[in-house]
Amino acid sequence: MATPPVRTKYELRLGAATREAFGKALVELGAANQHVVVLDADLSKSTYTAEFGKQFPERFFECGIAEANMVAIGAGLACSGKIPFASSFSAFALNKGFEQLRVTAAFPRVNLKIVGTHSGISIGEDGPSQMSIEDISLACSLAGFAAICPADEFAMTRLVHAAAAYDGPLFIRAGRAKAPVIYSADQEFSIGKAVQIADGSDVTLIACGLLVAESLLAADLLDAEGISARVIDLHTIKPIDRDMIARAAAETGAIVVAEEHLVDSGLGVRVAQVVAETHPAAMEFVGIENTYAESGPPDALLDKYGLRAKNVAEAARRALKRKR
Amino acid sequence: MQKTSNPAELAAIAKQMRREVIGMITEAKSGHPGGSLSATEIVVTLFCDVLRHDPANPKWKDRDRFILSKGHCCPILYAVMAEFGYCPKDQLNTLRKMGSIYQGHPDVRFLPALEASTGSLGEGLSLAIGMGLAARLDQSPARSYVVLGDGEIQEGQIWEAAMFGAKYKLDNVCAVLDNNRIQLDGFVKDIMPLAPLVDKWRSFNWHTIELDGHNIAALQRGFAEAAATKGRPTILIAHTIKGKGVSFMENNPKFHGTAPTREECARALQELA
């Protein structure tokens, strides 16, 4: 294959949080399409849906602290041709609204978009009751749902627009913390098509959300050791980009999957299924290990729970040892 | 079938629909006869008189919406929809069978003329409210009607939706509570009492009307009052008899979810002759 481009060290500057980009994209959508409506459950200042509410008050529905009802009202709006975005913290939207997502949205295939912010442990001080570490698993267990976890503000903006154009139930996962900027505004995204950010031939690092930036930093750490790492942003977890995963497995023979989610039920296991079905390769997984986290500064939590570039690089070294 | 407002004609249709329900569930060998029989006049009055709908154009944008939130009572809905030509009458006896459009609970994938898939209790009021909001945004005259079970309102989501409907003054939403006083495990008053039922809804700021759910003229007056009520949603608390019309099913918790045998079917059809 072609010589991979030589990368210098990544200088990742912090941009906007993906939740903030979500809120801005909603306002753009609201101006462009009168059928876009937004629901929130008393967290609109935190989910950034409040600005949509200010600009389009007749299309914004404050549901109060009642997520199950919010989801099913959103489904009713979708049944009558609206494009509803229902938003709350991911821990509440998915867990409290799950049964309604299943019966009123997934099974009749209703065009509802559910947006969970404050996903993962990087929300920090609020602690584990607010930390959604199982939402990818829940969303992906809804038959027919799409699930998306953008890595930065530019990915989020593009993917929110893509979600509005997508006909069917869909989950968007957003974070609280400011996200390192990976893309530029002209980067294009489409649902179901992963983005290969860096080419490499020895190992592939696949990630979503905040762990994409950590994987890029890990690629630099590995590069310094003479290991060529490919980095893939699997922003759409479902439907999964089988072609890009199979190609990476065939061409690099070693794969690390990294996510800010329970390690045994999120992105990793879904990638592993594709690898097992196409080109079996040595695999390692980085994620939260069968536990709930705690209050603390986001950076300290990411360090303690092993969601850093150094953890991804270590996993890559382990995978390379087992690579045939 | 043509629509009619004549109570005697509606009563005759109701009796025929009860016969269909008994036949379908007997053939299926499983299902929920009691709640279909208690809701018969409610569903018949809505489809035959109250709802603005067009079987030739089932997705007409301004149609009134009907949601059977107590989805297990779908036999009465299927029977009435078939009577209007939304779906084939000659397949009603395939209820609950593999491949049938008449699924065990309403399923829009099999019967697209339905407004919603229901069966998990507590969700239909929220769906009706979502449709009511959409109608308001579209400045459509469409109204949303939803039939709830009395056991069903033990679900917390019902009260979340009740608060929402009152907050948004959704006078284009009308709920009907089929208050037949029996749920799967027994009598509602023993399983989880709802009293004071009418006060509960009034305190949630719904326009609340109590009536006899088997009295067609009373139902017609109730629906007219609901349509004339502005600034808040309406609920009709319809007092009904579970298993109504078949003596050995009336007020008998067994027939919440048990199909009649062939012999019981014959006796029931005799009573409904």
Image (cartoon, rainbow, N blue to C red):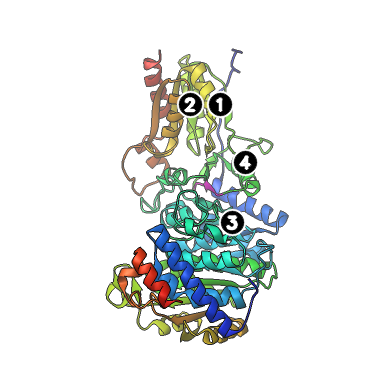
**Residue type pointed to by label 2:** Leu
> Which amino acid type is shown beneath numbered disc 4?
Phe
Q: Chain of mark 3?
A: B
| Quadrant housing residue B141 | bottom right
- Location of mark 4 (residue): A154
x 46%, y 84%: residue: B202
Residue type indicated by callout 3: Pro
For disc 2, the chain is A
Spot occupied by residue A73 in the image (x, y as percentages of width and height): 53, 63
Identify whether B239 is placed above or below A76: below
Does the magenta-highlighted stretch encompass residue A172? yes
Question: Residue placed farthest to the left in the image?
Answer: B190
- Of residue B119 and residue A132, the one placed in the foreground of this image is B119
Per the image, the residue denoted by label 1 is A243
Magenta part of the chain:
A169-175
Which residue is more in the foreground, B100 or A163? B100
Instruction: Pick whichever, B145 or A88, lies toward us.
Output: B145
Check disc 1 and give the amino acid type: Asp
Residue B210 x/y as whole percent = 46, 86
Q: From the viewer's perspective, is residue B229 above or below residue A35?
A: below
Where, by quadrant of the figure, is residue A301 drawn? Answer: top left
What is the CA distance from the residue labelled 1 to the residue labelled 4? 24 Å
Relative to B235, B262 lies left or right = left
Asked whether the residues under marks 3 and 2 belong to the same chain, the reply is: no
Residue named by callout 2: A205
